[in-house]
């Protein structure tokens, strides 16, 4: 007897699980293509159904073989997000914490960001944003620019100074 579409849609898919060895091989392949954090690896192993007792062993092997290095990941992530995406330090830090990177590594990595570069990036972003904002007065304009810059992860004090420069022109 043929199953109808309704019957097949109602049956839940069986979740395929991976053994620790399969997870190790898959993660080695993934890590050789792109940087991954230890938190990424743990999340992937969780979704693959790798037994909790074996996850740390797989992660330790990946770290030992230098497929995963949280400091290297944090440096690459910070470089990419600050230079390419134009994010501020606060937004980068928040995303690194979400990826289970330790506070020490985040602090060391963010110390490499130059405040002059960050300020220049923010100035360019606000200059591009300025013509697109519809505001009925200067107060509303400044508020919208402030919310935008803070949402991009820039420091409050720097943002206020840059907004003053950009709006005074």
Image: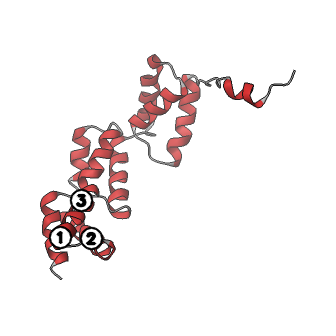
Give SS at disc 1: helix
Task: Give the answer, above or below, for where 150 lies relative to 59.
Answer: below
Q: Mark 3 or mark 2, which has the lower sequence index?
A: 2
Q: Which residue is drawn at 17% across and 73% down?
A: 138
The CA span between labels 1 and 3 is 11 Å
Q: Mark 3 points at which residue?
A: 147
Q: Mark 1 points at which residue?
A: 163
For the N terminus, the image quarter is: top right
Residue 61 in the figure: left or right of residue 1: left
Q: Quadrant of the C terminus?
A: bottom left
- Nearer to us of marks 1 and 3 is 3
- 164 lies above or below 152: below
Q: Calculate the distance from the C-alpha at mark 3 to the C-alpha at mark 2.
A: 11 Å
Q: Name the residue under label 2.
A: 126
| Mark 1 or mark 2: whose residue is earlier in sequence | 2
What colour scheme was applied to this rendering of the protein? Answer: secondary structure
Q: Which of 131 and 53 is in front in this view?
A: 131
């Amino acid at each position: 007897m043929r199953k109808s579409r309704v019957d097949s849609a109602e049956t839940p898919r069986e979740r395929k699980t991976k053994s620790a060895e399969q997870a190790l091989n898959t993660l080695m392949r993934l890590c050789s293509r792109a940087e991954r954090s230890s938190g990424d690896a743990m999340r992937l192993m969780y979704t693959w159904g790798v037994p909790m007792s074996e996850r740390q062993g797989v992660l330790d092997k990946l770290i030992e073989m230098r497929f995963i290095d949280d400091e290297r990941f944090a440096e690459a992530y910070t470089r990419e997000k600050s230079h390419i995406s134009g994010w501020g330090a606060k937004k980068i830090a928040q995303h690194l914490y979400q990826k289970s990177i330790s506070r020490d590594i985040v602090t060391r990595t963010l110390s490499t960001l130059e405040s002059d570069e960050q300020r220049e990036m923010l100035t360019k972003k606000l200059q591009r944003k300025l013509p697109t904002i519809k505001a009925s007065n200067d107060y509303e304009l400044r508020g919208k620019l402030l919310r935008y810059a803070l949402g991009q992860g820039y420091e409050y004090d720097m943002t206020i100074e840059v907004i003053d420069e950009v709006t005074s022109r």
